Image (cartoon, helix red, strand yellow):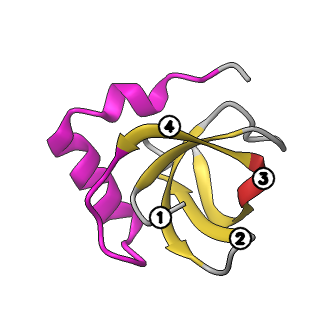
Amino acid sequence: MQVGRVCVKTKGREAGKKCVIVDVIDQSFVLVTGPKALSGVKRRRANVTHLHPLEDHVKILKGASDEEVTKILEEMGKTEDMKTKANF
């Protein structure tokens, strides 16, 4: 798991929604966000066992804000991708 990796949450009320890792806290937890306008995942700490990494990677700096993540996703044309819910 590294900063910028796009993942799908597999547990909790946000299960199936896509998010982006913005910081690695330790080997068990990461900070994720899914800008509200795109996927609706709140910026929060997530257990890495509750995430399924996807092949997509976004070039962001560690600790990037929701606005920065949204801007990069829009530039890459990934906004529609983030809105679709994955089934796991």
Query: For the C terminus, which image quadrant?
Result: top right
80 or 20, nearer to the observer: 20
* CA gap, disc 4 and disc 2: 17 Å
Element class at badge 4: strand
Q: Residue at x 75, y 70 (%)?
A: 28
What is the three-letter code of the residue carrying label 3?
Thr
Task: Estimate the x, y position of residue 40 in percent, counting from the top left.
Answer: 57, 43
In the image, taking residue 65 as reference, residue 59 lies left or right, namely left
In the image, taking residue 88 as reference, residue 77 lies left or right, namely left
Please say whether residue 68 is one of the residues in the magenta stretch: yes
Q: Residue at x 39, y 27 (%)?
A: 81
Q: Quadrant of residue 82?
A: top left
What is the three-letter code of the residue carrying label 1?
Gln
- Above or below, comparing residue 67 to residue 29 in the picture: above
Task: Estimate the x, y position of residue 35 in percent, counting from the top left.
Answer: 46, 51
Q: Residue at x 60, y 48 (%)?
A: 41
Sequence-first disc among 4 and 2 = 2
* CA gap, disc 1 and disc 2: 11 Å
* CA gap, disc 4 and disc 1: 12 Å
Residue wearing tag 1: 2
Q: Quadrant of residue 14?
A: top right
What is the three-letter code of the residue carrying label 2?
Phe
Residue wearing tag 2: 29
- Picture disc at residue 54: 4
Residue 53 is at least partly visible in this image: yes
Residue wearing tag 3: 49
Element class at badge 3: helix
